[in-house]
Image (cartoon, rainbow, N blue to C red):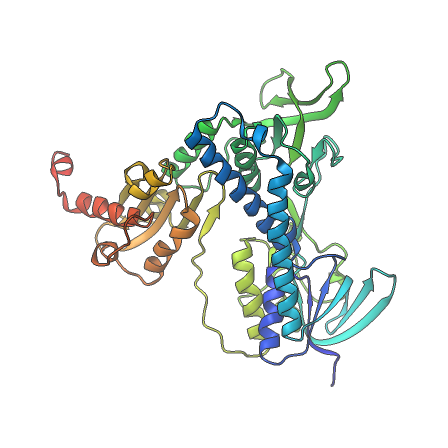
């Protein structure tokens, strides 16, 4: 039976984009349906990954320069937010242009509108000009992403109380910013604004934050936040947010768990970053045989196929790990499985990075996880204040930690807090996936001066511990 398309992709985020490109490269007739009237790329390019990292890069560059010149002025006294946002906008514009050009170059059809699944092979699209169109397809990929959960104790007005989208529309750096939530994105934005001189308070509803980090890396993160001046208040429940006309201030009212006192913070701006839920409520999943979990995320198998054989799903809409990096691979692999395209198996070992100041990154098992799994482990450490490259870059706070299986010297995990952590983590990832030992870092020459030299130092440190070499270890 002849259908309109070989595959229809709903959503042009990293999963949808990579699926459409992979299918088009093999000559498939592809349609991408995108809900946004203006842009491609979803949160990847427009509200999440690209804009926040571009803004962070600009803020960090200014922050480091500001430290070098030892100015008494706060950075926001000299540098306007509009200037940083222009840089961010330029990066976004280039990324959008690139994505659009690649779709055109590979003859991928695009349509703006909201898609509903009618049956296993039919999509209905309501366009932005009010038209309703139906298309048939052999396969479809649902990659509609996720959206933030709104707060219950207050409203987001996008003027004083903002979310992750409207925070990018500020026209100045506030003197005081209160962030409600302690997710990865919350910590990244806290770093950005504090680096520019804003006084930032984080109200965290939980007992701790970034608890998945290795314990020693977490301590470095805590130290970096303290050095930046970020105040984190844990176990805080928000009672309300409102303007006090008598004091001409916005107030955030909250209380600490198991305490009766009402606390109040005066602030200029509020940023709310809560949880996220999948964009599935209007997708028409009830019309086909697909399953969702208790949180509404679409269930898929190892090939990213749903319970309906012709429907695949990838990206944030299927839940963990909800990373742009992973979504690119998921979308590509989904296309490969649709059309029996040969594809190398992708490792299940996923590196994680957090773009705070400084960055953190990890891959593999933490020290505690390895112990819990029954491994006898030794750790090797390198501190950034001993790295020439870190001294040159004026970024000496940091640690690189190797988790080593004591008997075999195999590398089980790498955990980094420090400048360029998101870049150098991949060297450790390569060694783990190749099942190499930490001797790799000693057998091979590593450029000097680089941050990657921390691997060599940490490897020597771990091996010396195992072999009880050196006076420090012999005395233990």
Residue ID at (55%, 79%): 340
Q: Nearer the viewer, residue 309 or 432?
A: 432
Image position of 204 with respect to 261: above or below: below
Where residue 421 sits: x, y (%)? 41, 47
Q: Nearer the viewer, residue 101 or 465?
A: 101
Q: Nearer the viewer, residue 186 or 45?
A: 45
From where the camera sits, is residue 293 visible? no
Extreme-right residue of the structure: 130
Quarter of the rendering occupied by the N terminus? bottom right
Q: Nearer the viewer, residue 315 or 245?
A: 245
Q: Is residue 243 left or right of residue 399?
A: right
Q: Is residue 174 left or right of residue 345?
A: right
- Specify the quadrant of the image occupied by residue 271: top right
Q: Is residue 69 left or right of residue 42?
A: left
Extreme-bottom residue of the structure: 1
- Specify the quadrant of the image occupied by residue 386: top left
């Amino acid at each position: 039976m002849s259908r309109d398309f070989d595959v229809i992709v709903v959503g042009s985020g990293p999963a949808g984009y990579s699926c459409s490109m992979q299918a088009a490269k093999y000559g498939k007739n592809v349609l991408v349906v995108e809900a946004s009237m203006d842009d491609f790329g979803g949160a990847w390019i427009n509200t999440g990954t690209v804009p926040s990292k571009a803004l962070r890069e600009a803020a960090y560059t200014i922050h480091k320069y500001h430290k070098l010149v030892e100015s008494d002025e706060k950075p926001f006294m000299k540098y306007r937010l509009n200037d940083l946002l222009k840089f961010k906008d330029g990066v976004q514009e280039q990324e959008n242009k690139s994505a659009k050009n690649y779709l055109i170059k590979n003859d991928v059809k695009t349509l703006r509108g909201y898609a509903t699944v009618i049956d296993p092979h039919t999509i209905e699209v309501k366009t932005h000009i009010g038209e309703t169109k139906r298309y048939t397809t052999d396969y479809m990929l649902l990659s509609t992403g996720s959206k933030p959960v709104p707060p219950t104790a207050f409203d987001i007005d996008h003027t004083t109380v903002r979310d992750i989208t409207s925070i990018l529309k500020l026209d100045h750096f506030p003197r005081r910013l209160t962030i409600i939530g302690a997710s990865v994105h919350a910590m990244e934005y806290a770093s950005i604004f504090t680096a520019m001189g804003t006084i930032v308070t984080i109200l965290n509803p939980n007992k701790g934050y970034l608890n998945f980090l290795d314990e020693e890396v977490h301590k470095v993160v805590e130290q970096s936040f303290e050095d930046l001046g970020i105040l984190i208040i844990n176990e805080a429940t928000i009672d309300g947010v409102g303007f006090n006309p008598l004091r001409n201030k916005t107030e955030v009212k909250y209380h600490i768990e198991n305490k009766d006192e009402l606390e109040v913070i005066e602030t200029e701006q509020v940023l709310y970053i809560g949880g996220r839920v999948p964009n599935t409520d209007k997708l028409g999943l009830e019309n086909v045989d697909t399953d969702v979990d208790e949180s509404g995320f679409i269930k898929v198998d190892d090939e990213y196929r749903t319970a309906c054989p012709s429907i695949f799903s990838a990206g944030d809409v299927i839940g963990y790990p909800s990373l742009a990096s992973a979504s690119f691979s998921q979308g590509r692999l989904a296309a490969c499985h649709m059309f029996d395209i040969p594809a190398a198996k992708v490792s299940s070992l996923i590196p994680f990075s957090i773009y705070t100041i400084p960055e953190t990154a990890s891959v593999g098992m933490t020290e505690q996880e390895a112990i819990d799994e029954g491994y006898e482990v030794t750790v090797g450490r390198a501190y950034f204040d001993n790295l020439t490259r870190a001294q040159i870059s004026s970024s000496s706070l940091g640690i690189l930690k190797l988790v080593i299986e004591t008997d075999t010297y195999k590398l089980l995990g790498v955990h980094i807090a420090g400048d360029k952590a998101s870049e150098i983590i991949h060297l450790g990832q390569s060694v783990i996936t190749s099942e190499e030992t930490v001797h790799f870092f000693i057998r091979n020459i590593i450029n000097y001066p680089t941050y990657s030299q921390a691997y060599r130092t940490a490897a020597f440190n771990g091996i010396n511990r195992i072999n009880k070499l050196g006076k420090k270890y012999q005395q233990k």
